[in-house]
Image (tube, rainbow, N blue to C red):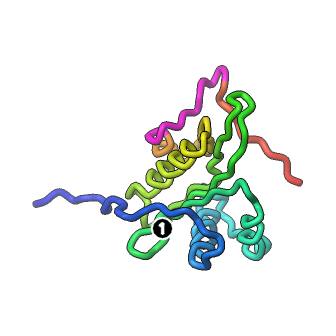
Amino acid sequence: MPAASGPAPFAGKVVTVDLLNDQHAAALMRLLEQYALDVMGGGKPLLPEVHQHLIERLKNFPTFVGLLAEENGQYVGLANGFYNFSTFSARPVINVHDLAVDPAHRGRGVGQALLDEMSRVAQENGCSYLTLEVRYDNPARRLYQRCGFVGGDPQTDEMAFWKKRL
């Protein structure tokens, strides 16, 4: 009896989000909503204001860099990042703000393809590093480690992401 095999590896491509492309905008919103509904995304739907304004506001946000994973004409993953600047390296950085993979396509390498492409974009643009925030209980931590992300030394540089609601 042949051994059971896992899901087929991701065989698509990663493309840059074009916010003027209605299909890209719709895919970004769909994947972001799926992520928001997931426990790791907070488990709640996006607010109506987000649905109404996000795409237009991103169009006017010059530091946005977005990527979509496309396979067989379907968008199955999303990475939203934003350029920032490191005063310690005097170079730009990209913060990966959202990494979302359609639940039906998880475990196939979609997230890795998105992070690999975000790394390529960052290197091409002279960035010193990529950053991301990750919950302590997020199973994607293994993916992030495989892609070269490290939490750092807890004694010196393990950071917690704090926020103040306005």
Stretch of the chain drawn in magenta: 145-156
- Residue visible at 42% across and 64% down? 105
Main SS of the magenta segment?
Answer: loop
Query: x, y percentage for residue 142?
Result: 46, 42
Quadrant holding the N terminus: bottom left
Query: x, y percentage for residue 83?
Result: 69, 48
State left or right for residue 20 relative to residue 147: right
Q: Nearer the viewer, residue 87 or 166?
A: 87
Residue type beneath disc 1: Val
Query: x, y percentage for residue 159?
Result: 69, 33
State left or right for residue 73 relative to residue 149: left
Q: Nearer the viewer, residue 7 or 148?
A: 148
Q: Nearer the viewer, residue 121 or 112?
A: 121
In the rendered picture of this protein, how many numbered marks are placed on residues? 1
Residue 117 against residue 157 in the figure, above or below: below
The part of the image, by quadrant, that contains residue 26 is: bottom right
Q: Nearer the viewer, residue 77 or 19?
A: 19
- Residue visible at 65% across and 29% down? 158
> Magenta includes 19?
no
State left or right for residue 54 relative to residue 2: right
Residues packed near mark 1 inside 10 Å, few (<14), some (14 to 19) or many (20 plus): many
- Residue visible at 57% across and 68% down? 31
Give the residue at the far left of this rendering. 1
The part of the image, by quadrant, that contains residue 33 is: bottom right
For label 1, the residue is 76
State left or right for residue 93 relative to residue 56: left
